[in-house]
Image (cartoon, helix red, strand yellow):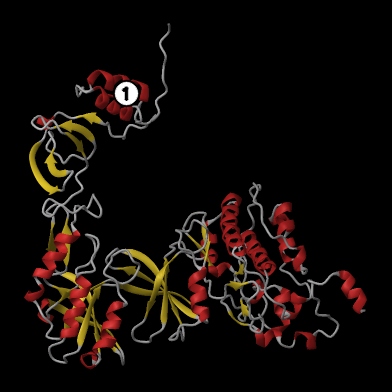
Amino acid sequence: MGVVEHVAINIEYKWCKPCRINELEKICIKSGNQKIDNIIQTMQLEIGDYCDQIFEWIPYNQFVNIKEIRRDDFIKSYSIKGYSGKTVKIYGISQDPNTKNYIMVLEDGYCENCGDQYIVLSDKWCRSCQINNLKEKFGNWTSENEKIDNFIQEMQLSINRYGDIVFEWVPYDQFDKINDIESSDFGNLHLALWMDGPLHYNRVRKKYIRINDKRVTLKCLHDSRNSIDEFLNEAKSYSIKYFDNILTIYGISQNPNTKDYILVLQDGYCEKCEIGTGGFATVYSAKWRDSNIMIALKYLHNSQNITNEFLNEAKSYSIKECSDNILPIYGISQNPDTRNYIIVLKYIGGGNLGEHIKKVYHWPGKLQLLVSIINGLKIIHKNQKVHRDLHIGNILCNGGYSACISDMGLCGEVDNIDKTKIYGVMPYVAPEVLRGCIYTHAADIYSFGMIMYFMTTKRQPFANYSHDQYLALSICNGFRPEINEQEVPKCYNELMKKCWDPNPKNRPNAVESEEYRRANPKNIQLTIHPEAYYTSRLLNPYTKDLLKWDNNSTLIDFTKSSNDYSAEQ
């Protein structure tokens, strides 16, 4: 009989189940009880990978430092140390040689002090013990205000994980190097060093220690000593959990001179610099100081009051890390001075498509960028929404050949679009929209066609024309950017022109990518007309009189069939 060769189940680690089973049969210790041995053997046969734990018979003399932690009428629980000096992490069966009782050997998941089970085994953090420790220290501090004290105690008793912040009363003399950031009618913001620093649970030492010289933000609210309830509601809006995507809060303090109460907050973002501005918002790059992550802050002008438009924009971004080619959102913030709201977005370092295209010289790279853009647009359309402001300034690139769609401020549901206001960059706006028809998926495809034009020519559409009522009229009458047929492959050119079709029904609703030949379009530098605008703006002043100027044209509704028009005529 020949030798049977088994293919390793885990090729990387050269692990073979049949060989491992044969090895276990040779080395495993027997219990002396046939039923127990059969159970152990059955469990061992269930292993399926190199990292699976081997269930085994463990001689009782392998255990040291046995300590009882819990007892009831049927079971005693013990904490033990293994023969290698490490905590026993996995399971097996043993037997007490004195009582002859069998023992289940379990992972160390119980507190040595009180016997309660850990919420998360790997943390080795016992909520019961920590809550009791905090209660014992309630008498060691006071704010001298009963409501404040009760609130701090309530916050301390709400911790559930080792990483949760222990909310504290922080004496004002603990703060050093206090610097002003902003001030307003509502209060002041300061940066400071908390000398002792907040409490942090050390899993190795199994106790809380302080992180000295911690940078924090101090938010001092004017006249808060006379409006305690309002102040505490403000404190509740922050989080004691590091992973909530909400600014975390460490505790409360009080200015000894003004007697105003202070929120002690996580040190937020800094190093702000403007990277773009438009008619509706200004965008800054920034760093989240604690994590050192680059982010983009979109300051929305005149957004002191939450509106449906603001919430709609926030919902239109993605919570995925660019996997759907839509810019990811981290959360929402607010400027404490102006009260304008801020959308906190992922920072994309490659710039917009208009800047990035200068570094892309060959067709495969251009096509990959177009695939990213159309994939993002498909996600928007799949969710029954339209972007409404798609142009190269709203396409962000990561430095390679991947892009994501940004600026979702005008994005909305297909059936819920206000057609009385026309926003955007005129050359990218579909003719039916300029004429006052409702915005549809096909209008986004028209904009994509203009992006295709830019990708191949590296020229903005209608760059040598004033973006006024005359250009709007020309677009409605079928005027399109000129292109040298030799600059692009034929199939690419045909697809681009389909996207431009004056009839929305003739435009494609999906774009397929294929391998095109290297095109090497000429690098033509044009002088842009002084009244050509490539940031979004209100276009109604240039579209309201289109029909008056174009007496020979008819406003055509392409949603009607040709028979409908024949009947009307």
Q: Can residue 34 be seen in this view?
A: yes
Q: Is residue 241 above or below residue 422?
A: above
Tell me if 263 is positioned left or right of 509 in this view: left
Question: Is 146 positioned to the left or the right of 41 in the image?
Answer: left
Image coords of residue 187 (percent x, y): 27, 88
User: Between residues 285 and 299, which one lies in front from this camera angle?
Assistant: 299
Please identify the quadrant where the C terminus is shown.
Answer: bottom right
The N terminus lies in quadrant? top left
Q: Residue at x 70, y 72 (%)?
A: 430
| Residue 285 x/y as whole percent | 39, 71
Note whether 334 is above or below 414 in the view shown. Answer: below
Within 10 angstroms of label 1, few (less than 14), some, or many (20 or more) residues? some
Corner quadrant of residue 5: top left
In the picture of the structure, the residue carrying the numbered disc 1 is 20
Taking the image as drawn, is residue 192 in sight? no
* Secondary structure beneath label 1: helix
Left or right, 519 with reference to 189: right
Q: Which amino acid does label 1 sit on?
A: Arg
